[in-house]
Image (cartoon, helix red, strand yellow):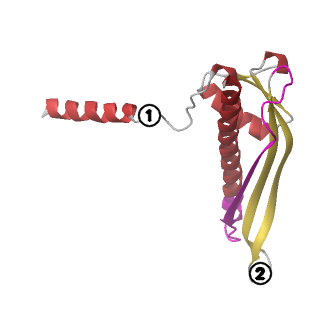
Amino acid sequence: MRQTRACILLMAWLMLTGCGYHLRGSVDMPESLKNMYLFNASSLLQTEIQNLLKSAKGKIAGSPNDAGIVVKVLKEDMTTRVLSIGSAGKSSESELNYYLRFQFYDNQENELMEEQTIEMAREYFNDQTAVLAKSNEEQLIRKEIYKQSARMLIARAKVAVDQIKK
């Protein structure tokens, strides 16, 4: 019985490692991405990118000259829009819209890729009887938007670095 259980665990482990499974949040990055400089990014976006870099044993560079890649944020905007109003005249459904336009450069200020854009929208129900809970939910949704944007930005940075190698 004990040998069967050990064999099953070993097979499960081999299957997971063989299919490329990795924990969510862990990122496999080329060395040039592990030292990134962010120019004009919001503190929330910077924090999420820093967390991703930290999980890949990378860091945010102190200056563009020390970076493997420079991310210049051209425009970043988070807006809230009311989608519906309840019978009491208060918002019952809202939408968060996030817009990020950026460009990649190397540490010699050479453009690596054309301008890139990330746009996201998330809707949520705004229950007026639980105002505090809904405020916390909105903050959580904002954080998730920044996390997802940071992952998308890193993925596009990989593409930019791969194009240089070709």
Q: Mark 1: give few (<14), some (14-19) or many (20+) Cα within 10 Å.
A: few
Residue 151 quadrant: top right
Marker disc for residue 45: none
Q: Mark 2: give few (<14), some (14-19) or many (20+) Cα within 10 Å.
A: few
Residue 157 x %, y %: 70, 33
Task: Find the magenta span and give its range.
Answer: 107-135
Q: What residue type is labelled 1?
A: Gly
State whether residue 51 is above or below residue 132: above
Estimate the spatial distance between the alpha carbons at disc 2 and disc 1, rounded to whole Å: 52 Å
Looking at the rendered image, the disc whose residue lies closer to the viewer, 2 or 1, is 1
Figure quadrant of the C terminus: top right
Figure quadrant of the N terminus: top left
Identify which residue is drawn at 44% across, 36% down.
21
Identify which residue is drawn at 62% across, 23% down.
30
The residue nearer to you, when weighing 123 against 32, is 32
Q: Which amino acid does label 2 sit on?
A: Ala
Name the N-terminal-most of marks 2 and 1. Answer: 1
Identify which residue is drawn at 16% across, 34% down.
4
Identify which residue is drawn at 84% across, 25% down.
110
Most distant residue in the front direction: 166
Residue 7 quadrant: top left
Secondary structure type for disc 2:
loop
Residue 33 x %, y %: 68, 25
The residue nearer to you, when weighing 121 against 33, is 33
Secondary structure type for disc 1:
loop
Q: Please give the residue where the numbered disc 1 appears in the rendered image.
A: 20
- Callout 2 touching callout 1 (CB < 8 Å): no
Q: Please give the residue where the numbered disc 2 appears in the rendered image.
A: 88
Q: In this view, does 81 lie to the left or right of 126?
A: right
Is any part of residue 71 visible from this angle?
yes
The answer to whether residue 118 is magenta is yes
